[in-house]
Amino acid sequence: MTVRVTLDVFSGRPIPTVELEGNEADDLLDRLRPERRLQADDVPTPPPVLGYRGIVVEQDERPDELPRELRLIEGRAIGVGLAHAVRDRELEDYLISEDGPFRELHIDVEPREFYDRVRELRAAYLELEWRHKWPWWDDVFVWPWPRACDCGPIYEPAWWNAPSRRPHNNCYNYACNYRTDTFAQPGRAHSAQYSSLTCESVRPAALADKLIDVPEANNACPEEGHLVALVVAPGWDFHWYRKGLDGWWSHKPGSTSATNLDNSGKLIRDPRSADRGPYTDFCAFMVVMHGHIKIE
Amino acid sequence: MLAFSGRPDPTWEVSAADAAEFVRLWEAMEPAQGAATRPILGYRGVRLVAPTSRAWQAFGGVVSRLDDGEDHRSDPGNLWEHALLRTAPPDLDLPGELPT
């Protein structure tokens, strides 16, 4: 029996693959046998596009319990019809160690450096998985806890994410807490729509809609209305956040679902320091006075 | 294309012949174990929607059928995704460069 083992970790350089036979192949398959079926909250986070994606094991003469191809990642074997914790939880440590099956490969870097890099990428995956499962963790022990904003809107994503509303209302609708079903554009309701995708153009368009500029806001709750924030991906797009009743920020990226997480999967204390992806320019804090604005 | 937050995402029509080819290519792809993690803000991939409501979404080396449970196929090198993006008409208002 031949078992092919692939370390699915690199993007640019060749992906290391070895073929095992005889006792070494039998031993590997034995250590991979299912110990218990995974529960819903055990299923791994989808691996990142770049980075550590686990170890792929392929075989032709498959034993009954294992599919032809499976992916081993953090002690869990995933394949067609398979989602199990494996019998030997230390198997992955062994496979990416200097004593593992990739020891025979000719690698163009020092083995120590190679394995250190793989372990680093694996640790990054673990952190990614941790953040997916417990996105609030880093914020639980934050001090001071954000002050509640008495006039802030309640974070209720389910209302905005209903199929009848989600595709037709964007970040501007959500930030203003104003459903139009028109994918509202700053300034459009007052024939003053922005002319370019810059802070200098989008900000006055929002002022035309009667949002109020508050340059001194510094992330503090206003006495009336609620705080919003405008950011821009220069030449590409604009985006808005809103500060809620609980003092945390949330947003609705375009036609996708409203969320209280940033691009790093963290809760948003301050949009100026959040991971905003391509929206690199922070433009302004503004206040939305309920019943005073008009957008479309 | 799924990319924007404030502006509407750009959409365009794909010819029936091209669409059929994309479906044929997808059917020939190897299964993948799940969709790639998409960012909350920024480019999130490209979606092909048929008049019959069948739909496929491509991002990060995986093309997923959206209307039929979880059916993910591997798209090494993002070739399917980039080919679909290249069907966009040249006069489409796409600020910046396509991520190809």
Image (cartoon, coloured by chain):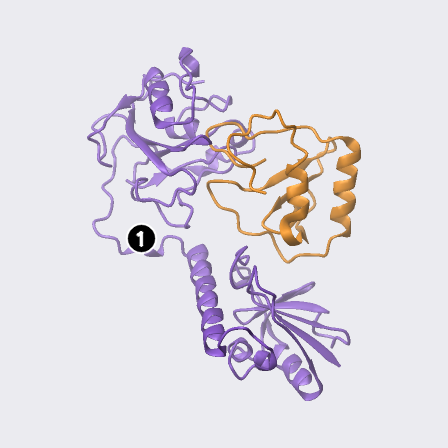
* Up-down relation of residue A102 to residue B73 (above or below): below
Which quarter shows the N terminus of chain A?
bottom right
In the figure, is residue A150 to the left or right of A131? left
| Along the viewing direction, whichever of A233 and A173 lies nearer the viewer | A233
| Chain for numbered disc 1 | A
Q: Residue at x 68, y 84 (%)?
A: A26
Q: Quadrant of residue B51?
A: top right
Q: In what element is the residue under mark 1?
A: helix
| Along the viewing direction, whichever of A247 and B72 lies nearer the viewer | B72
* Up-down relation of residue A121 to residue B44 (above or below): below
Q: Residue furthest front?
A: A108
Q: Is residue B66 visible?
A: no
Q: Is residue B23 visible?
A: yes
Q: Which chain is purple?
A: A
Q: Residue at x 49, y 46 (%)?
A: B39
| Along the viewing direction, whichever of B96 and B64 lies nearer the viewer | B96
Which quarter shows the C terminus of chain A?
top left
Q: Which chain is orange?
A: B
| Along the viewing direction, whichever of A120 and A266 lies nearer the viewer | A120
- The picture places residue A90, in percent across and down from the top left corner, at 51, 79
- The picture places residue A68, in percent across and down from the top left corner, at 73, 69
Q: Residue furthest bottom?
A: A23
Q: Residue at x 58, y 50 (%)?
A: B60
Q: Quadrant of residue A269?
A: top left
- The picture places residue A145, in percent across and down from the top left corner, at 24, 48
Q: Badge 1 local density, few (<14 within 10 Å), some, or many (20+)?
A: few
Q: Quadrant of residue A101?
A: bottom right
In the figure, is residue A166 to the left or right of A286? right
Circle 1 sits on which residue? Answer: A139
- The picture places residue A265, in percent across and down from the top left corner, at 42, 50
Look at label 1 and name its amino acid: Asp
